Structure formats: structure tokens, C-alpha cells
Amino acid sequence: MNIKSGDTVLVISGKDKGKTGKVMRVLPRENKVIVEGVNIVTRHKKPQGPTNPGGIVKFEAPINASKVMFYCSKDKKGVRIGHKFNADGTKVRVCKKCGEVLDK
């Protein structure tokens, strides 16, 4: 999976197509990501005692990782990610469009 937690991504398909957001959580076993402000779902929750009241709760649901692209702040668009090795032998992610190193 090329997307990591904290990356800014662009949604390329579905009801939230065109939105950008920060990846809050990555679920590699299910090939899904949770993006801030994308795929908002509503659930009606029952009260679970005095400390946890019920009500209508809105939260971000997971979205398939194939529906998001890394958003390059330099190019201002969604880009593909490539990999290369630095001189010291560490593997880093790079933007295929501009060649900028994404891993700091």
C-alpha cells in the first residue's frame, strides 16, 4: 500500500469524488483508508450508560484505497507514487510527476 497515515489524498471516484483530506488511519488487511471529511456516515446509537449518551453520531467510514490518489502540494493534483533508493540505501516514496521526495 502506497498511502500512509498523515498523507493528503484526493478521492478519484464515488460520492465524494474531487474532495481532498488527510489520512487518519490505514487498514492494510482490508485495503482501506479512513480520510478526514470523506465518506461521512450517520448512525443512531443507543445509550451505553450514564457516561455514554445515545443519539445520532456522524463519523468517517473506511474507503477503498484504490479510490484515492496521493495529492502533491507542489503540483496541486493527484499523482502516482514511485519508489527509489537514496545514496545511503533507504527506500523512499517519490512523486512521479515532479520527482519530489515524499518521505521526510
Image: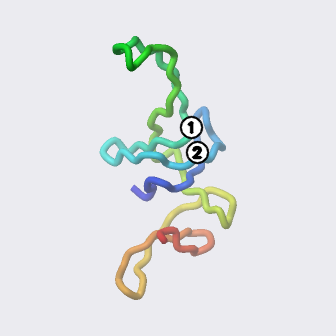
Q: CA distance from mark 2 to mark 1?
A: 8 Å
Total marks shown come to: 2
**Is 66 on the left or on the right of 16, as rendered?**
left
Q: Earlier in the sequence, mark 2 or mark 1?
A: 2
**Is 73 on the left or on the right of 28, as rendered?**
right
* Residue 40: % across, % down: 55, 30
* Residue 36: % across, % down: 54, 42
Residue under numbered circle 1? 38
* Residue 95: % across, % down: 55, 68
Q: Residues within 10 Å of mark 2 (few under 14, many from 20)?
A: many
**Is 43 on the left or on the right of 96, as rendered?**
left
Considering every residue shown, the one lying at the far top of the view is 46
* Residue 67: % across, % down: 52, 44
Question: Does residue 98 sit above or below 9 in this rendering?
Answer: below
Considering every residue shown, the one lying at the far left of the view is 29
Mark 2 or 1: the one toward you:
1
| Element type at mark 2 | strand
Residue at the (54%, 61%) spot, across then down:
80
Residue under numbered circle 2? 11
Task: Tell me the amino acid under the disc marked 2.
Answer: Val
Residue at the (59%, 45%) spot, across then down:
12
Question: Does residue 12 sit above or below 4 in this rendering?
Answer: above
Question: Does residue 20 sit above or below 57 in this rendering?
Answer: below
| Element type at mark 1 | loop
Task: Tell me the amino acid under the disc marked 1.
Answer: Val
Residue at the (38%, 75%) spot, across then down:
91
Res. 48 mark: none
Residue contact at pointers 2 and 1, CB within 8 angstroms: yes
Residue at the (40%, 47%) spot, across then down:
26
